[in-house]
Amino acid sequence: MAELYKKYSEEGFHIVGLECQGSAENAIVQMCKDKGVTFQITTGGDLKGANVRGIPHGFLFGADGKLVGEPHPGEVEAKIKDLLKETSAAMAGPGPYVKLAALAAQIKSGNGLGTVLKTLRTKKDSKDEAEAKEAAMMFESLSGAATRQLEGAIGKKESEPMSALKTLDKLALQFTGDEIGTKAKSEADAMRKDPKIKKEVEAETMFKTLADMEEKLKPFQGSKNPKADGFKKLNQQALVGLVGGCQTLIQRYPETGAAKKAQEMMEQYK
Amino acid sequence: MRHTLWSALLLLPLAAQAMTIDDLTVGNTVHGPKSTLNDLKGKVVYVEYWGTR
């Protein structure tokens, strides 16, 4: 799941790990470090009605909040990909939409949503009652989803600046012409002028290069265990470059999120 | 009695199917992003019962 989170978290996928064995916090943090877990782990959490038969045991929810199922590990990724495709569609609301089917389809595409909101504002006052009702429902759902995403991004400007910036850029583009798009652009522009954020962006760009280098490391006997002698010997030169790159990033951009990630990466391969 | 038992067994998966993300109590975050239930709305969420042992 750690890998799936890294792969899809920027696309609207989230994991909550509910620690249910009463483990000490330092044991949890250490295990997360050892296993490369970056998703949210909590204590004292619970899922009402969950019938858990051994751990790990997972429950998958769609963007509409409904339980999709308890997928087998082998099928989780495929299900996540399918659900993420539906996330844009979920912004339109449950429907059904007859009069405004074309607008619902446009929302599903994820493009031109600023124009859609503008159209919906007019159609909410339509003399056609059925159309007005659909417009009100669709507007509430779309503007609600967009507002939550905007507020979420603004809320994590300090703690997760790169993720916040990515969301703001996406909203600015999707909602061009609407106040949500304007606000998102204004927030993103302000972030980019912040010297601290500029450093984060540069550091993150550098880290992406290191992550690509890591991806290209060759497996030894089918494994990429960084502690295995065979793996280290096979990738000797590449590892020197990788560790050196991490050190450079940490020196050049200390106290950035990317520096923390580079530190963790370096500790794996030193 | 048997009818009642079968009815109860048939209803169990339906009860699980009625579960929504609102049934989640997030708890106290000790690692990773500190997302609240509201932050999870509109996202695809995997809730995993997890342990260190």
Image (cartoon, coloured by chain):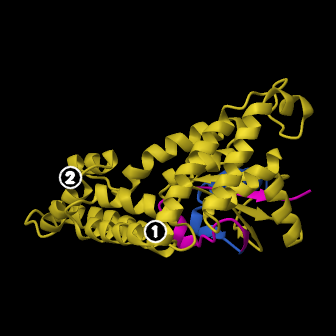
Which chain does the residue under circle 1 lie in? A
Discs 2/1, front:
1
Which chain does the residue under circle 2 lie in? A
- Rendered hue of chain B is blue
SS category of the residue bearing label 2: loop
The label on residue A153 is 1
Which region is colored magenta? B29-53
Where is A230 relative to A21, above or below? above
Q: Residues within 10 Å of mark 2 (few under 14, many from 20)?
A: some
**Does residue A66 appear in the picture of this structure?**
no
In the picture, measured across the screen, residue A45 lies left or right of residue A231, that is left
Q: Nearer the viewer, residue A129 or A252?
A: A252
The label on residue A100 is 2
- Snapshot quadrant of residue A113: bottom left
**Does residue A251 appear in the picture of this structure?**
yes
Label 2 amino acid? Leu
The residue under the point 90% across, 35% down is A228
The residue under the point 62% across, 68% down is B23
SS category of the residue bearing label 1: helix
In the picture, measured across the screen, residue A169 lies left or right of residue A248, that is left
Q: Which chain is yellow?
A: A
Q: Nearer the viewer, residue B53 or A98?
A: B53
The residue under the point 15% across, 60% down is A119
Label 1 amino acid? Ala
For marks 2 and 1, give the CA distance. Answer: 30 Å
In the picture, measured across the screen, residue A131 lies left or right of residue A203, that is left
Residue A151, position as x, y percentages in the image: 43, 73
Q: Nearer the viewer, residue A62 or A248?
A: A248
Residue B35 falls inside the magenta stretch: yes
Residue A182 falls inside the magenta stretch: no
